[in-house]
Image (spheres, rainbow, N blue to C red):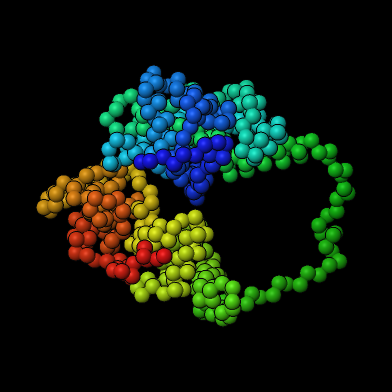
Amino acid sequence: MSPRPTTGPAARRSTPRARIGPDDLRRTFEAVPARTSAEGEPFADSWWGRAWVDALESLSMDEARLARGRAYADDGQVAAITVTPGRVVAYVHGSRARPYRAELRLRTFADPGWEALLDAVAERPGHLSALLAKEMPHSLARTAEEAGVRLLPAADDLDPSCTCPDHGRPCKHVAALCFQTALLLDSDPFVLLLMRGRGERELLDALARRNAEHSARERPAAPAMPSVAAGEAFAARFLPPLPAPRPVPPHPGQPPSYPDLPGARDPLGLDHLATDAVARAHALLTTGRDPLAGFTEWQDAVRLAAARPTAGLTATTRALYRELAYATGRTTTDLARAVAAWRQGEAEGLTALETPWDPPAGPFDRARPALAAAGFPRFTPWRNHLTHPAGSLQLRFGQDMRWYGYESDPGTDDWWPRAAPDPDPVSALEALLAGESIPDTAGDDDPHYVR
């Protein structure tokens, strides 16, 4: 791939936008474009970013692999990077057409180490101010070490792995991933803290609580006020009973009509959102439970989009797709694919689309013999996926113990949910081969044609 020359501080500080998972423990950064760097120029700007590179270089005994990895990073051959506690993962394009999965594991802190670190940081408010400014002063690293916690990694903290045949530690693909990770650390030291085990929101909440407790301890105690018995205080007062609650209507009401004014939001889209909010409020009043409690912003956006018909896609639905995709930082194609997964299995279907996982021994291990006994060719396993050798059909084992059918054009990696899930892999594959479509998602009206 041809690099786009980009130099100077602006190039170094351009950080890819990150998507943050619902639990603050998963951040995915978009791929960094290709750029050029001068001979001998440090790859990272910040001292902590350079310390990360130093740890990588101390891990490797092969300067040629490191140089090749840096060239891969400069050429933009590292795809989106996902950071979770103790793990950094990305696909890296090498000399072959199919990218390799590069992974770097990092030792996380145990709870006592976190408590010691948070206590030490809370004692010096300047540390919190620096973190909020996306800086990591040397004094913060020293404070952590004094508390028995080493923030910046050494070679023995890093454990690389890759799907390539090179057994170097690290190989050039992992080295490229490490160099690109140094750029992420340059602009946001919370990425390092997430690698060590905790997300940004959790850490800031914990530090805020400690600061409040510290301020309370230092604030002088208020003078004691004379106490009055509750019976004496309310003896001369009469509290009338609360009025009876209004009866809950048997059905959700209709929202008001919204005028179609120049420059105003789409009235039909507003009506759809208002109708959904009314139904949710009615369910809360009648059952005492919110039917959408626990949904993430992305799940709720997919649910809203899935409630709109896509056969004969209307301008209103197209506008809703564009607005929901923009609000969640996704593309309309991402949203359309997620809608297909939602119609396939609601929240569990969306999880099957977006979250590969390692299923325990049992139904997944029995699937390939069952498919072979039914006369199907040998499927290729990867985590919870089974892929047809022709590369156009795939079964994904969901965490609800059902098999979800997927289809892609041969030779591409563009998988779309097709057919309803089934606990039996053979039945799921037969439904996929029979072309049993998910309701309201078929043909040229499929929403991934939204523009």
Query: Residue 249, can we see it?
Result: no
| Camera-nearest residue between 242 and 23 | 23
List x then y, in percent, for residue 403: 27, 54
| Camera-nearest residue between 68 and 185 | 68
Is 325 rendered above or below residue 126?
Answer: below
Please state the total of marks drawn on the protein image: 0
Left or right of residue 99, residue 70 in this image: right
What residue lies at 41% left-to-right and 65% top-to-bottom? 451
Left or right of residue 158, residue 438 in this image: left
Is 384 rendered above or below residue 308?
Answer: above
List x then y, in percent, for residue 444: 31, 69
Work out which residue is located at the far top of the displayed protein and give it: 61
Residue 302 sits in quarter: bottom left
What residue lies at 40% left-to-right and 57% top-to-bottom? 334
List x then y, in percent, for residue 394: 25, 52
Is 417 rendered above or below residue 314?
Answer: above
Query: Residue 213, can we see it?
Result: yes
| Camera-nearest residue between 382 and 109 | 382
What residue lies at 59% left-to-right and 73% top-to-bottom? 263
Q: Quadrant of the N terminus?
A: top left
List x then y, in percent, for residue 241: 73, 72
What residue lies at 19% left-to-right and 64% top-to-bottom? 434
Residue 218 sits in quarter: top right
